[in-house]
């Protein structure tokens, strides 16, 4: 395991003076790059880099039976895999609490915004509906996996093609009926509190120096659709209010990156 | 007209809460909590040596918080093996408790906090956190303050406190789990899902802070009553 303590103290000292690495402003994202449609076997795919953090997302669509309590709805499943490729502190093995929290927070932001209309995924009530599987692989960890994974999931979803089906509801290989329709484009912003300062999009050193973390998902109407606080520190009511204001301002800027896809 | 809720409560009214401390004889500290239909036992063991040793932090003690739901605690039998939800709740609630416990006082050690949900109807994570803080204090673990939790949110257009299951299932439902240290008002748990405006969020935060103070009184009462019982 790498000892980050030296870097943590350094980061804290700098943040106290209002200095971030790369001279970023406190509410400034690193450069986001998105490539889509890169994986032929996936219904939709995206490679996203956020600074040096790199994640891949791929979608698959499968026909399944609707859940008994929602007989006229399809569904979505979003999962994040922390590959041991991504960092020396990641190991192969079953999902740990870090990847489970990450998966569930990314899932919640997208689900709660009603990004997909599950009713539109229905084929035959009680019998057949589309289920969308979004699998996200973190391949280089340079901080803020939450936002990188959310962007990758949204980019993959936005470019997902719905497979063509025959009369027996079997998928026809290589043929597509159209694009998956997204009703909303939620944007997630993740903040770190370090030395009583709040910064957006923590890089790796900032991630390790984080006292408290907050992820907030904002939808097209600038409403909040999900919140998650993590780590052992705290936020004050005023800090939370400020975060909501910054996130509402950030929405347009971050949304733009999806419009080109 | 005063808008009443499905179960007749006022918008900011909590369900009845009952907390009893020192209910598990073998544990270093414990609490039993009823919060509406929720029935929860929390037990604390430690501080004790962290095993395996490589997980220990030589600078600080650790809180190992384990949240589990019994198979019979939900309408459809739950698989007893911990699910992803259990693991996520264990992580964030453990982190919230860690801020209150003076972890610097027991380097290399661990405090196990186990919570078992026996019956449930919405709001189990905040009930679990509230009970755990009482169990930790009951165990004599040094803390800078109690930790007090409530759920607030939205249902049928209203900002409300302590949602029950029917309200959580409302079309416009927002469920927000919230915890703070009641003296400093430092917010240590915040999880929300559902759509709310900035204004609604501000209202929900304000309500959560007020309601925490109410719950705190019950926590303190539960801790005090143990000593009253000893006197008698």
Image (cartoon, coloured by chain):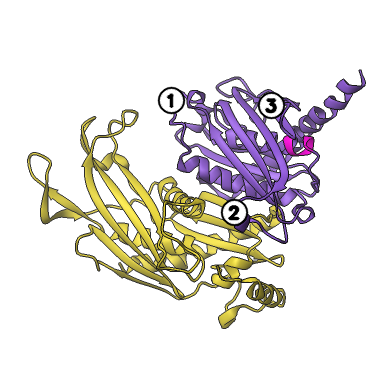
Q: Is residue A156 left or right of residue A207?
A: left
* Residue B36 in which image quadrant: top right
The residue to which callout 3 is attached is: B32
* Residue B80 magenta-highlighted: no
Q: Helix or strand or loop: what does disc 1 sit on?
A: loop
Quadrant (top left, top right, bottom left, bottom right) of the C terminus of chain B: top right
Range of residues picked out in magenta: B135-139
- For the stretch drawn in magenta, the main secondary structure is helix
> Is residue A224 something that shows in the picture?
no
The residue to which callout 1 is attached is: B77
Compared with residue B36, is residue B130 higher up or lower down, i.e. above or below? Answer: below
Name the spot of residue A65 as percent of width and height, x first.
24, 35
Q: Helix or strand or loop: what does disc 3 sit on?
A: strand
The residue to which callout 2 is attached is: A230
Residues beneath discs 3 and 1 located on the same chain = yes
| Picture residue at 41% right of the left edge, 55% below the top | A93
Compared with residue A51, is residue B117 higher up or lower down, i.e. above or below? Answer: above
Q: Is residue A183 left or right of residue A186?
A: left
| Picture residue at 71% right of the left edge, 76% below the top | A13
Name the spot of residue A102 as percent of width and height, x first.
48, 54
Parent chain of label 2 = A
- Tell which chain the image draws in yellow: A
């Amino acid at each position: 395991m790498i000892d980050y303590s030296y870097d943590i103290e350094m980061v804290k000292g700098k943040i106290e003076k209002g200095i971030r690495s790369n001279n970023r402003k406190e509410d400034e994202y690193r450069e986001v790059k998105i490539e889509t449609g890169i994986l032929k076997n996936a219904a939709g795919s995206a490679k996203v880099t956020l600074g040096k953090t790199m994640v891949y997302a791929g979608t698959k669509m499968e026909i399944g039976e609707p859940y008994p309590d929602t007989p006229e709805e399809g569904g979505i499943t979003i999962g994040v895999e922390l590959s041991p490729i991504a960092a020396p502190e990641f190991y192969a093995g079953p999902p740990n609490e870090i990847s489970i929290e990450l998966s569930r927070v990314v899932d919640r932001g997208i689900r709660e915004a009603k990004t997909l209309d599950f009713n539109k995924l229905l084929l035959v009530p009680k019998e057949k509906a589309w289920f969308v599987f979004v699998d996200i692989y973190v391949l280089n960890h340079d901080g803020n996996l939450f936002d990188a994974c959310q962007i990758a999931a949204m980019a993959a979803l936005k470019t997902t093609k719905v497979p063509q089906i025959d009369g027996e509801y079997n998928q026809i290989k290589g043929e597509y009926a159209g694009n998956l329709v997204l009703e909303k484009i939620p944007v997630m912003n993740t903040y770190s509190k370090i030395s009583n300062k709040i910064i957006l999009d923590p890089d790796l050193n900032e991630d390790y120096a984080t006292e408290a973390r907050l992820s907030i998902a904002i939808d097209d109407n600038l409403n909040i659709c999900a919140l998650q606080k993590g780590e052992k520190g705290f936020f004050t009511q005023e800090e939370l209010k400020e975060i909501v204001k910054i996130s509402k301002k950030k929405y347009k800027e971050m949304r733009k990156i999806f419009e080109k896809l | 007209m005063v808008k009443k809720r499905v179960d007749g409560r006022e918008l900011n009214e909590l369900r009845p809460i009952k907390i009893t401390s020192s209910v598990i004889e073998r544990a270093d500290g414990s609490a039993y909590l009823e919060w509406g239909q929720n029935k929860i036992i929390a037990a604390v063991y430690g501080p004790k040596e962290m095993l395996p040793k490589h997980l220990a932090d030589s600078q600080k003690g650790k809180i190992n918080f384990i949240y589990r739901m019994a198979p019979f605690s939900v309408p459809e039998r739950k698989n007893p093996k911990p699910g992803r939800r259990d693991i996520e709740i264990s992580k964030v609630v453990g982190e919230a408790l860690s801020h209150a416990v003076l972890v610097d006082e027991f380097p290399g050690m661990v405090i196990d906090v186990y919570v078992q949900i026996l019956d449930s109807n919405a709001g189990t994570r905040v009930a679990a956190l509230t009970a755990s803080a009482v169990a930790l204090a009951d165990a004599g673990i040094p803390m800078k303050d109690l930790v007090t939790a409530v759920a607030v949110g939205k249902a049928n257009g209203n900002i409300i406190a302590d949602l029950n299951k029917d309200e959580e299932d409302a079309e416009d439902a927002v469920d927000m789990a919230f915890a703070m240290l009641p003296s400093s008002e430092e917010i240590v748990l915040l999880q929300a899902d559902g759509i709310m405006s900035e204004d609604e969020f501000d209202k929900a935060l304000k309500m959560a802070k007020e309601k925490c103070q109410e719950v705190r009184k019950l926590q303190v009462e539960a801790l005090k009553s143990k000593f009253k019982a000893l006197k008698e």
